[in-house]
Image (tube, rainbow, N blue to C red):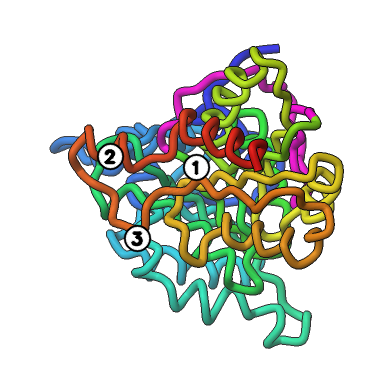
Amino acid sequence: MPQLSMRDAVNQALHQEMERDSRVIVLGEDVSGGAGGTSNEREASGGIFGVTKGLLPRFGAERVIDTPISESAIVGAAAGAALAGLRPVAEIMFADFVGVCMDQLYNQIAKFRYMFGGKSACPVVIRTAMGAGMNMGAQHSQTIYGLLTAIPGLKIVVPANAHDAKGLMIQAIRDDDPVVFFEHKALYPRKIEVPEEAYTIAFGEANLVREGEAATVVALGRMVTFAEKALDTLAKEGIYCDLIDPRTTSPLDEETILESVENTGRLVVVDESPPRCSVAADIAALVASRGFESLRAPVGLVTAPHAPIPFSPALERAWVPGPQAIEAAVRKVLDR
């Protein structure tokens, strides 16, 4: 089985779905590379992260569409195309720019199915790059999946590796509801084995990455990798934990989390976002309200501080939750 990076896995998913279904289109800033030099030829570089590379030569400019620098226009056009029968995949270059098109997300595509009594579907996927650790500053480094998880009508996907990214992307394109797909920039180059054939991963089904009886650790996106490093250290001392990657925050696989906590009695939630009104807070509240009798210690939260992301590399490293913080949180709930 070949090894692919997350960048290449998403690219492969787009190629395979565009090949399978002529209704699938891609649109966004520089998704086809923009115009190159004085010849006005497309470079087909696939945007600043290279995720859509090669789509233009294969599928042409009618299906791989460069847009103006306007997130409102991108998402609005994608919504209209979806209502008209296409299956658009729109790219917002950085997740931080979601604020520019929030009305299209919050008041339009999330509510079409409800407002039209289920007679209308809006099968649009919005891809976007997120996350700190790349020294891109406070306005290009946020993980805002929690903000959009709070909106009914949107499905939110946060893959932690290339295998899941491909399966979840194909599922997102085939889904009849709007999906926001968050890709962590720091995970783009990381490689694991990915099947060549097309496959789907169902939304709302968490991945049990590791098993153990000491505690339950729930982590998202890049934090899954950091949690694995922390659990490697603990395993050397005979401390084994469940590690759950929800993969989607809406729908959320509540039952897997609750069943794990019932077995372990302890919970640590790891989330790169700041703590207030976060996915970490939501999962902690879920367990406190529906699994309180299982808990043998207070829930541990490992999050970023409630502060903007620093541009300074040293300060950014301190801002991002790391393996040592996760290890310390697990030890704390075990001591309690």
Pick whichever, 200 or 40, lies toward us.
200
Residue 26 visible in the snapshot: yes
Q: Circle 1 — which element? A: strand
Q: Position of residue 294 (x, y in %)?
A: 83, 53
Q: Residues within 10 Å of mark 3 (few under 14, many from 20)?
A: some
Q: CA distance from mark 3 to mark 1?
A: 14 Å
Reading the image, the residue beneath label 2 is 316
Residue 238's place in the image compared with 291, above or below, is: above
Label disc, if present, on residue 97 of the rendered structure:
3
Q: Is residue 243 magenta?
A: no
Q: Amino acid at mark 1?
A: Glu
Q: Give the residue at x 65% y 49%.
A: 22
Residue 196's place in the image compared with 222, above or below, is: above
Q: Amino acid at mark 2?
A: Glu
Residue 122's place in the image compared with 293, above or below, is: below
Q: Is residue 198 magenta?
A: yes
Instruction: Classify residue 97 as left or right of residue 23.
Output: left
